[in-house]
Image (cartoon, rainbow, N blue to C red):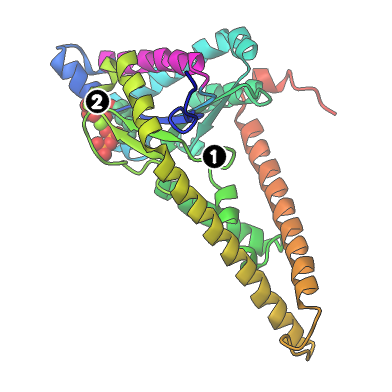
C-alpha cells in the first residue's frame, strides 16, 4: 500500500514540559526527591524512544527560573540531581560521542550553583561539535527572560556599532535567543494535565501542542506514540501558520529596506519615485544589512563561547590546547 506522505509527516524536534513529579510522589507515598529522581530517569527512557524513532532534536523544560522560589531544600535536591546526572553523562562520554549527541543547556546559567555550571559547561563543551542528535536542557530558563535577554544583546550590538537600529527584526532577535540554533519544536508535550506553558518557548510556539493527563514519571511509550499520532493529525495547520509567518516576515524586511533606501536617496536630493536605480539600491542595501547581521551573530557567538569557556572547570581548561 502506498503511504500518504501527508499522514506520515515526521516530527524532527519534540519538546517536553516534564511536569507532575511531586504529585506522583504524593500519590505513590514516596519522597518528593524520589519523585524528582524518577522524573530524571523517565527523561533518559524518553530520549531513547526519540532516538529509536529518528527524532533528532529534543528540548526539555527541566527547571524554570520561577522554580528557584521553591523551598531551599527542594531546590538543593534538584540541583544535586542535575549535577549527578550530568556527571554520569560525562562518565559515559564515549556513548555520547558514539551517538553523536550534542548537549546544550539553555537558560541563564549564571543563576545555577557553581558546581552545576561546571558540569553543564563540560557536557556542552565536549559535545559541541556533535551533529547527529541534539538535546536541549532548559535550566534556569523562562521564555520572558530569553526574550528580554535577546533585547539586551541586540542593544549591545547597536551600542557597539555592529547593528543599525533599523536592522532589528524578528530574525535578529531570534538569533540572540538561547534557542537560536534550533528550529521551533514540531510537537510540544506537557504532562500532568496542566494546560498552560508556564513561560516555556512562548516565542517558538509554531508547534503542535499536546497536553496529557499522565504525570511525568508515569509517561509511557504508549503516551508517546499517542503524541506522535496527534502531531501527524495536526501538523498541516501548524505548517500553514509557519508559512504565513515566514511570508509576513519577508514582507516586513523588504519594506524596512525600502524605507531606509528612500531616506538615503532623499538625503542625496534624489527623488526615489523618479529614480530607476531604486531596485538596485535596495538590493545593495539588503546585502550590506545581511553582512552586518552575520558579523553581529559571529561576534555574539564568540562572546558566548568565551562565557562557556569561563565556566569550565580547571581540569578541562588544562586539556584545551592553546593556539
Ligand atoms: C516538574 O514536576 C519538575 C520540576 C518543575 C522541577 P513538579 O515538581 O512541578 O511536580 P508537580 O507539578 O508539583 O506535581
Ligand atoms: C513547569 O512546571 C516547569 C518545569 C516543568 C520545569 P511548574 O510546575 O514549575 O509550573 P507551574 O508552576 O505549575 O506553572
Ligand atoms: Mg509542576
Q: Quadrant of ligand 3?
A: top left
Residue drawn at (35%, 23%) of the image: 78
Is residue 71 visible in the rendered image? The answer is no
Query: Going from the N terminus, do you reach mark 1 or mark 2 first?
Result: 2
Q: Which residue is mark 2?
A: 20
Q: Position of residue 163 (x, y in %)?
A: 68, 62
Residue drawn at (65%, 58%) of the image: 157
Relative depth, front residue between 247 and 258:
247
Question: Could you say which quadrant of the image residue 315 lies in?
Answer: top right
- Residue 97 falls left or right of residue 141: right
Number of marks in picture: 2
Residue drawn at (46%, 36%) of the image: 185
Q: Is residue 316 above or below residue 295?
A: above
Asked if ligand 1 lies within 8 A of label 2, the reply is yes
Q: What range is drawn magenta here?
A: 34-54
- Disc 1 versus disc 2: nearer the observer: 1
Is residue 116 visible in the rendered image? The answer is yes
Identify the main secondary structure in magenta.
helix
Amino acid at each position: 500500500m502506498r503511504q500518504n506522505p501527508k499522514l506520515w509527516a515526521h516530527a524532527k524536534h519534540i519538546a517536553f514540559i516534564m511536569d507532575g513529579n511531586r504529585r506522583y510522589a504524593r500519590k505513590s507515598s514516596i519522597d518528593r526527591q524520589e519523585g524528582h529522581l524518577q522524573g530524571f530517569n523517565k527523561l533518559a527512557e524518553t530520549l531513547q524512544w526519540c532516538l529509536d524513532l529518528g527524532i533528532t532534536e529534543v528540548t526539555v523544560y527541566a527547571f524554570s527560573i520561577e522554580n528557584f522560589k521553591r523551598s531551599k531544600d527542594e531546590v538543593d535536591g534538584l540541583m544535586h540531581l542535575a549535577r549527578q546526572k550530568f556527571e554520569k553523562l560525562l562518565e559515559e562520554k564515549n556513548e555520547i560521542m558514539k551517538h553523536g549527541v550534542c548537549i546544550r543547556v539553555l537558560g541563564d546559567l549564571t543563576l545555577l550553583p557553581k558546581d552545576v555550571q561546571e558540569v553543564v559547561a563540560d557536557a556542552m563543551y565536549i559535545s559541541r561539535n556533535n551533529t547527529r542528535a541534539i538535546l536541549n536542557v532548559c535550566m534556569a530558563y523562562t521564555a520572558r527572560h530569553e526574550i528580554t535577554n535577546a533585547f539586551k544583546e541586540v542593544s549591545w550590538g547597536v551600542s557597539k556599532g555592529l547593528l543599525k537600529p533599523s536592522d532589528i527584526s524578528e530574525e535578529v532577535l531570534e538569533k540572540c535567543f538561547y534557542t537560536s540554533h534550533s528550529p521551533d519544536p514540531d510537537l510540544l508535550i506537557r504532562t500532568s494535565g496542566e494546560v498552560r506553558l508556564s513561560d516555556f518557548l512562548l516565542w517558538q510556539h509554531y508547534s503542535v501542542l499536546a497536553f496529557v493527563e499522565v504525570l511525568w514519571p508515569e509517561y509511557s511509550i504508549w503516551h508517546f506514540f499517542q503524541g506522535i499520532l496527534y502531531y501527524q493529525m495536526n501538523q498541516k495547520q501548524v505548517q500553514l501558520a509557519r508559512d504565513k509567518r515566514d511570508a509576513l516576515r519577508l514582507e516586513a524586511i523588504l519594506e524596512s529596506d525600502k524605507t531606509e533606501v528612500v531616506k538615503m536617496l532623499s538625503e542625496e536630493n534624489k527623488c526615489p519615485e523618479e529614480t530607476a536605480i531604486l531596485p538596485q539600491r535596495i538590493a545593495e542595501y539588503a546585502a550590506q544589512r545581511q553582512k552586518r547581521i552575520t558579523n553581529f551573530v559571529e561576534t555574539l557567538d564568540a562572546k558566548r563561547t568565551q562565557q562557556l569557556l569561563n565556566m569550565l572547570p580547571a581540569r578541562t581548561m588544562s586539556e584545551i590546547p592553546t593556539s
